[in-house]
Image (cartoon, grey):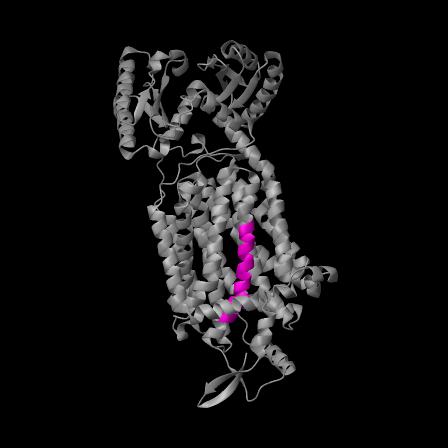
């Protein structure tokens, strides 16, 4: 592996003009393909194998008109204090609003007059009413004129003295996603890179190559969108992960290149060794990320599968960019900019193989005797106090992880939006006037002969279930073989009692199916959310087992050790559990809610843990491979275990720290956004990177190496014979590098020893 990648790096360096031109052609070609591709399909959501999905499929077949995908808005009106919407003066204002909404836009299909169905749309005390506005187009296609018309109609009613709020997917979502947080993250990233390399050119290279890789990946997703059914949101995860790993991978190779130049190698040799050693680590780190993202297919939710595979493809592009485009660009960088101060060791005549190895070991010892940097000083401290560092790290993360035991999952809804939004205000008005369950009705489908009569009979039986507030009369389709009923729970859509009610109704329905000779399904948005959360819960452990298991095997091949990958996997589980604990404490329990601007603490978004596992696992394995591969390289070249740890931190600690700070700054930018769920994702990823990079990889890992000594690299002989040898540490390159090569100095040709 190292030999092949070294040759590839040298080739890219020598043919840098061709390589850069090739990538520019790929970038331009993919951009052109994306710009000329048909529009991507609208977002679709399905969960094969669940009762909710089965019921929705039945509704699509039996009630094609009712299952249309047009957007909808629910406008809630409350009369002034002391008045009722049934009074003539208030009724005139409400009817004026109904007329205004109906004529507001050509996209509006109709408006349901609340006075036509007063028992359903007007509260018992007569103070509140609501009207349903239906649209001819899906929510994503509602234009700005329609949004503005809806806002103007509601504002006019407010000026008339009514309290008016609106919810639903046709209502414009006001989000302050102006990019301030992202701009701060990019600025911090640029500063960190400049401080790391001491050069604007060297700092800009990882950013440029990462952007090119992400551009190619996202353009590919867009170009294939209509063919593979990839919606516009599929690229969200791909962009975030692609940018993160793209910067990391380029940063690692550029840093290794500069280290090789500091040891006196020519630019071409340094590029070859950087790609051969650091590039090998990049390839295997990329494989672990691809495994984590592609493993989302285990969840069996098409949307997540597509997002995971799209992101995995973008990561693969980032790896290719790192091992081909980065060494090519290094060839264009000024020598003084990309080189560090170093010494050249000369030999007057060729050396024997034995002396070559001795010279290489001597050079390594000289490097260790030079003034230690912060990374090597920290590693030396950990080696002197391994037990104390290990206990502080494990106990600290374990304490932070305790709240994770109380994790409650849910999906975002209008009830979790900011209290300043009209959607949340409409949600609260409906809950106050019609009961908390009104915002999360359940839909029951009954498939049988004489569906109307049988449906009414079933409705009476369901009404007797504890937790049911009301059941509507059955509505049958034209064929009379399927009926639907609306069941209103007594509790809100995100409450635990509602989830228990859904399960109980399904149990009751199972008994009624035999007595009524019918097929009964319970669905609706609330039931769909519950099934979605349950599906993710069921898939979490298998997904975790698959990802960690495959990565364990991969790392065992890379490091030829049993304990190193075991330590890496356990460290990841510790950091991700601690991150979940912090998320629960802040976003579910409400600790420091004022600091982070959280309006409504509540259940954690169902997709967040599994996304966080995929993202953090990829970055954690990046940091593990980057640090430990340098330790392994030093160890196989003759260093003692403790010296190998110090070498790993001397050359890799600064790079890993810089990469972690960059990722934390990018993810932390999302914390300043107004949307609580965006805050949650940004906070979770930032805190997880903090825990994994600085506590696990830079404290617990060296402490364990200090305690294990040579045992850390133990591998059974029978397993050593079975596992393929990939030479990630560049052992073969080390032998080749020790071979003499000529260098001209002062008119005399001397032999340069690596």
Front residue (pair 152, 529): 529
Say if 595 sits above or below 19 in the image. Answer: above
Q: Which SS type dominates the magenta stretch?
A: helix
Residue for point 66% across, 63% down: 706
Front residue (pair 709, 398): 709
Residue 243 % position (x, y): 44, 54
The quarter of the displayed image where residue 502 is located: top right
Front residue (pair 572, 239): 239
Residue 373 % position (x, y): 53, 70
| Stretch in magenta | 272-291
Left or right: 177, with 603 as reference point: left
Residue for point 28% across, 11% down: 88
Say if 429 sits above or below 457 in the image. Answer: below
The quarter of the displayed image where residue 536 is located: top right
Q: Is residue 439 visible?
A: yes
Q: Is residue 406 visible?
A: no
Left or right: 468, with 434 as reference point: right
Q: Based on the picture, tell me whether residue 280 belongs to the magenta stretch.
A: yes
């Amino acid at each position: 592996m190292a030999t092949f990648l070294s040759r590839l790096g040298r080739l890219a360096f020598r043919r840098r003009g061709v390589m850069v031109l090739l990538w520019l052609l790929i970038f331009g070609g993919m951009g052109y393909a994306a710009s000329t591709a048909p529009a991507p399909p609208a977002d679709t959501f399905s969960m094969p194998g669940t009762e909710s999905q089965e019921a929705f499929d039945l509704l699509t077949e039996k009630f094609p008109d009712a299952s249309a995908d047009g957007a909808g808005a629910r406008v809630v009106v409350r009369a002034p204090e002391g008045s009722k919407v049934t009074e003539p003066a208030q009724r005139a204002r409400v009817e004026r609003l109904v007329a205004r909404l109906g004529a507001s836009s050509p996209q509006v299909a109709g408006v349901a007059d609340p006075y036509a169905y007063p028992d359903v749309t007007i509260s018992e005390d007569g103070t509140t009413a609501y009207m349903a506005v239906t649209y001819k187009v899906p929510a994503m296609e509602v234009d700005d004129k329609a949004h503005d018309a809806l806002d103007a109609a509601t504002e006019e009613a407010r000026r008339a003295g009514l309290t008016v709020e609106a919810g639903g997917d046709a209502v414009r979502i006001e989000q302050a996603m102006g990019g301030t947080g992202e701009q701060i993250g990019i600025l911090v990233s640029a500063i960190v890179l400049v401080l790391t390399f001491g050069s604007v050119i060297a700092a800009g290279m990882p950013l440029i190559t990462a952007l090119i890789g992400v551009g190619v990946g996202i353009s590919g997703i867009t170009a294939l969108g209509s063919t593979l059914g990839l919606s516009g949101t599929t690229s969200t995860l791909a962009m975030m992960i692609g940018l993160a790993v793209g910067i990391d991978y380029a940063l690692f190779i550029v840093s290794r290149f500069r280290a090789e130049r500091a040891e006196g190698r020519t630019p071409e040799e340094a590029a070859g060794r950087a790609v051969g050693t650091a590039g090998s680590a990049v390839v295997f780190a990329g494989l672990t990320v691809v495994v984590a993202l592609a493993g989302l297919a285990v969840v069996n939710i098409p949307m997540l599968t597509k997002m995971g595979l799209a992101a995995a493809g973008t990561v693969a592009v980032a790896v290719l960019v790192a091992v081909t485009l980065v060494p090519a660009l290094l060839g264009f960088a000024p020598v003084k900019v990309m080189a560090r101060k170093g010494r050249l060791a000369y030999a007057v005549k060729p050396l024997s193989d034995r002396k070559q190895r001795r010279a290489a070991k001597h050079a390594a010892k000289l490097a260790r005797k030079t003034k230690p940097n912060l990374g090597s000083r920290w590693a030396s401290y950990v080696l002197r106090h391994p037990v104390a560092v290990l206990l502080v790290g494990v106990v600290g993360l374990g304490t932070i992880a305790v709240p994770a035991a109380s994790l409650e999952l849910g999906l975002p809804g209008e009830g979790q939006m900011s209290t300043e939004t009209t959607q949340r205000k409409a949600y609260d008005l409906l809950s106050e006037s019609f009961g908390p369950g009104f915002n999360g009705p359940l839909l029951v489908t009954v498939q049988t002969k004489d569906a109307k009569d049988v449906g009414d009979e079933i409705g009476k039986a369901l009404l007797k279930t504890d937790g049911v507030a009301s059941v509507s009369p059955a509505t049958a389709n034209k064929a009379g073989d399927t009926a639907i009923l609306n069941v209103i729970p007594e509790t809100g859509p995100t409450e635990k009692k509602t989830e228990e009610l859904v399960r109980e109704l399904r149990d009751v329905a199972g008994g009624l199916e035999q007595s009524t000779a019918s097929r009964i399904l319970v669905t609706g948005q609330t039931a769909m959310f519950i099934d979605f959360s349950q599906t993710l819960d069921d898939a979490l452990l298998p997904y975790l087992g698959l990802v960690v298991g495959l990565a364990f095997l991969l790392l065992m091949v890379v490091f030829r050790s049993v304990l190193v990958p075991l330590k890496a996997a356990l460290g990841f589980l510790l950091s991700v559990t601690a991150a979940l604990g912090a998320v629960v404490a802040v976003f579910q329990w409400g600790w420091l809610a004022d600091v982070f601007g959280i309006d409504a603490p509540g259940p954690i978004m169902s997709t967040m843990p599994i996304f966080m596992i995929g993202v953090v696992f990829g970055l954690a394995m990046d940091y593990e491979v980057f640090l430990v591969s340098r330790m392994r390289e030093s160890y196989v070249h003759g260093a003692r275990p403790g010296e190998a740890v110090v070498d790993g931190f001397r050359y890799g600690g600064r790079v890993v720290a810089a990469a972690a700070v960059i990722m934390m700054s990018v993810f932390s930018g999302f914390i300043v956004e107004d949307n609580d769920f965006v805050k949650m994702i940004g906070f979770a990823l930032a805190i997880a990177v903090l825990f994994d990079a600085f506590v696990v990889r830079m404290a617990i890992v060296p402490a364990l190496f200090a305690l294990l000594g040579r045992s850390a690299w133990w591998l059974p002989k029978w397993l050593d014979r079975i596992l393929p040898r990939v030479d990630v540490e560049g052992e073969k390159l080390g032998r080749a590098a020790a071979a003499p090569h000529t260098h001209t100095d002062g008119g005399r040709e001397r032999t340069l020893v690596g």
